[in-house]
Each structure stands twice: as C-alpha cells, then as structure tokens.
Amino acid sequence: MKKISISLIFLLIIILAINITKFNGTKEANKSENSEELVKNEVQWKRLTKDIPQIAYHDNLSLLEKIQMNYENPKDGHSSKYEDKFSLKDHFYTGNPTIFEGVILNLEPMSEMVETKATILVKKVWHGDQSVKNKRIYTVFRSGITKAKYAFSSIEGEYLNKKFDPDQKVLMVRKDIPVPKIGSVIIGSFKSFKMTSEAYDSTRQSIYGNKYGIKFDQFYLLKNPRTNLWVKDKKRFVLNNPEFKKLKDNIEFKNLYALTDYWNE
C-alpha cells in the first residue's frame, strides 16, 4: 500500500511537471508570436508615416484650453470643464466603469475618418468587465494618416487648404493626444462603442465595420484621452499628454497626479 502511494505521488509529480512545462512553453510561444507581430507592425507603420508632412491640430490654443476641450464630465456625461475632483480614485472608478491596461499591438490608418485604428491586447482590467482580459480590443485615435481633402474640407464639401493637393497624404497629429507607439503599454478609461451616440450613426458604423473590419463587441472608445490616458515610460506610467510636463505640480490637477502615482504603486 505504501509503495502504491509513493508511486502514485511520483506519477502525479511527473504529470504536474509536464503540464507546467507545456504551460510555460505556451506562454513563451505566445510572447514570441506577439513580439514578431509587434516588429512586423512597427516596420509597416514607420513605412506608412515616412516622409509625410505633419500638421498639428489646435496649435493656437493654450495648454489649459487644450486640456479642457471636449472634456466629458463623468457626473452627467456631457462636455464641460475638467474638474479635478473626478480624478479622485473612487470618483474616477465610478465615472469610468471600464479601465484597461494593455499593449498597443497595431496601428492602422483610417483615412476618410482622419483617425487611427489601434489594436490593443488587454493585459489587466483595473475596473470593469474581466472577460476582456487577455483578449484583443479595438479603439480609435482622432488623428492619423489621411488625405488633405478629408482633413481640410468644410461640411459642404468645399476644399479649404490650397497648400496641399487634395490627394496629398498628410499626418494629422494632436500634441495633447499623441498616438502611443506600437508596443506601448497604456492605461485608459474606455466606453463600449455600443453605448455611445456614434453607434447610432449608420454611415460611421458601415465604414468602421465594412471597410476597417472592426467588430463592435470588441470596440471601445477612449474617454477623455487628454486626461485619462497613461503610457508606460520605462518603468513608470505617465500621462500620455506631454503638455502636463509643462504644468508639473499644478494645483488644478493634484488628484490626477495622485491617480498617476496610484497606477505605479
């Protein structure tokens, strides 16, 4: 009986060791696969953006005006001025029910929309739906590679910029909402596309879904990316908006800075 027990224990140890080896092997394979994908996508993005003239949005606005612009108040969901009290951790979690940490796997231009499609691998769910962990989601940045005719036309369709040929490729950038590089680790507050007013825009839905292959159950929009988006710089998360470096220790954003420290604990 004792010999049988020892043999059984020994057998279980062997089985456990084999499973651990398989698990580690799968993790390494996935890591390697992601690394290869990142390198491939980064090369592609650099090729697409090479030698394209860059044009910055809102360069005439002050730093504080840029931060306040189109800020969505978590209290009522309507645009208003930034209120630092909503960056207190408890308020932030209440007003932002979906907070993900993930890796930017790919960036793709959406020329007609003057947007960039980002594929993100969710590594951690700080708050919200845990089912998306280790899955891919999509979001968009409201800037990117486009043609001049899409960037500089009025609502009526009149082309307003005589500096560029309408079909000239340009890279529209927002200095206060820079698009993180491929491979960047980010933390952001998101909202499901299905829960936004844009989900009822049939034209936008058609372009997103049919032309750019976005699956709406995996599609999230960034919420207040001027203030609610962080990117890992070496070992620490910092606000993605570089304008904050010029406003360091500004009392108006003390809770936002404290929230940044919280992500790094």
Image (spheres, grey):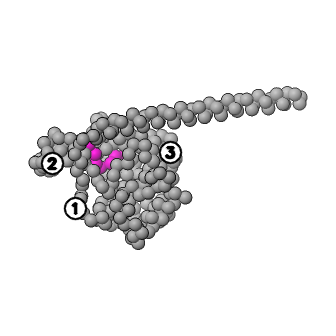
Task: Please provide percent x and percent y for residue 150.
Answer: 19, 45
Magenta stretch in the rendered image = 139-145
Q: What residue type is labelled 3?
A: Lys
Dot 2 crowding, Cα within 10 Å, few <14, some 14–19, many 20+: some
Alpha carbon separation for disc pair 3 and 2: 39 Å
Tag 1: amino acid: Asn
Taking depth in this image into account, of 90 and 25 the one nearest to the observer is: 25
Residue 157 percent coordinates (x, y): 13, 46
Nearer-N-terminus badge (1/3): 1
Q: Is mark 2 on a helix, strand or loop?
A: loop
Can you say whether 19 is above or below 175 in the image? above
Q: Do the residues labelled 3 and 2 touch (CB within 8 Å)?
A: no
Give the residue pinned by disc 3: 123
Q: Is residue 141 magenta?
A: yes
Specify which label sits upstream in the sequence, 2 or 1. Answer: 1
Majority SS type along the magenta span: strand
Mark with earlier residue (3, 2): 3
Q: Does the magenta stretch include residue 42?
A: no
Pointer 3 local density, CA inside 10 Å: few below 14, some 14–19, many at least 20: some
Nearer to us of marks 1 and 3 is 1
How far from the left and from the top, in percent, is residue 162? Answer: 10, 48
Marking on residue 153 = 2
Tell me if residue 53 can be seen: yes
Of residues 24 and 110, the one drawn nearer to the viewer in this rendering: 24
Which residue position holds label 1?
60
Marks 1 & 3, CB-CB < 8 Å contact: no
Q: Which residue is drawn at 42% across and 37% down?
A: 38
- Callout 1: SS: loop
Q: Residue 75 placed where, x, y %? A: 40, 64
